[in-house]
């Protein structure tokens, strides 16, 4: 988009997009669809055979804490906690809810989708794009 090859992007992750928008000199902007914006939650977990499960649990606890979620936001991802305020360069889930309304946030689920459904969706999407 920054080279002018494309005029719009859909389902672009906010993590890499926010810094690009900030550096674009007003050329690019991020907008949320107020009739339904998909949010992709980031997953975190501990492998069943982790060599140091106690350390892993401490790390997960940190990531989910207020301090950890602020670090997540400082790293360019979106904090989900209510007690981490949005600020210059720090983005939050509440910022999305405020922009589109809670009913218009569609949280993507981690689930296996049958190949036929994936093909149907991508065929429809590509058809809408004239491909």
Image: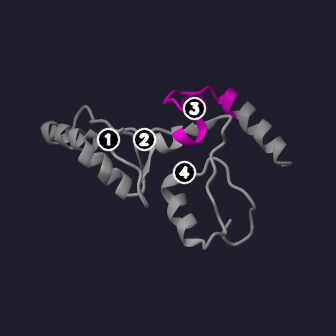
Name the residue tied to disc 1: 83
Compare residues 104 and 127 and report the one nearer the observer. 104
Q: Is residue 37 left or right of residue 5?
A: left
Q: Dot 4 lies on which element?
A: loop
Of labels 1 and 4, the one closer to you: 1
Return the disc, 1 or 2, that comes first in the chain's sequence. Answer: 2
Determine which of the numbered discs, if any, sits on residue 25 in the image: none
Is 112 in the magenta? yes
Q: Secondary structure at mark 1?
A: loop
Q: Which residue is mark 4?
A: 13
- Closer to the N terminus: mark 3 or mark 2? 2
Judged by depth in the image, the label closer to the viewer, 3 or 2, is 3
Residue 69 at x, y percent in the picture: 31, 46
- The residue to which callout 3 is attached is 106
Mark 1 and mark 4: span between their CA atoms?
A: 23 Å
Which residue occupies the foreground of this view, 114 or 72?
72
Disc 2 element: loop
Q: Which residues are magenta?
A: 98-118
**What residue does disc 2 label?**
42
Q: Along the polypeptide, which appears first: circle 1 or circle 4? A: 4
Closer to the observer: label 1 or label 2?
Answer: 1
Q: Is residue 60 above or below residue 109?
A: below
- Give the Cα separation between the discs numbered 4 and 3: 14 Å
Q: How many marks overall?
A: 4
Residue 125, picture quadrant: top right
In this rendering, the answer to whether 10 lies above or below 119 is: below
Mark 1–mark 4 contact, CB under 8 Å?
no
Answer few, some or many: residues within 10 Å of disc 1's Cα (few below 14, many 20 plus, some between 14 and 19): some
Is the residue marked by circle 2 packed among few (<14), some (14-19), or many (20+) residues within 10 Å? few
Q: Position of residue 58 (x, y in %)?
A: 17, 40
The crowding category of the residue bearing disc 4, from other C-alpha atoms within 10 Å (few below 14, some 14 to 19, many at least 20), is: few
């Amino acid at each position: 988009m920054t080279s002018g090859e494309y005029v719009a992007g859909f389902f672009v992750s906010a993590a890499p997009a926010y810094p690009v928008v900030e550096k674009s000199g007003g050329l690019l902007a991020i907008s949320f669809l107020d009739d339904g914006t998909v949010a992709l939650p980031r997953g975190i977990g501990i492998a069943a055979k982790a060599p140091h499960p106690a350390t892993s649990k401490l790390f997960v606890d940190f990531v989910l804490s207020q301090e950890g979620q602020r670090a997540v936001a400082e790293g360019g991802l979106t904090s989900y906690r209510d007690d981490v305020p949005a600020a210059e360069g720090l983005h939050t889930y509440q910022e999305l809810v405020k922009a589109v309304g809670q009913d218009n946030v569609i949280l993507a689920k981690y689930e296996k989708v049958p190949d036929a459904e994936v093909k149907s969706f991508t065929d429809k999407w590509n058809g809408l794009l004239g491909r």
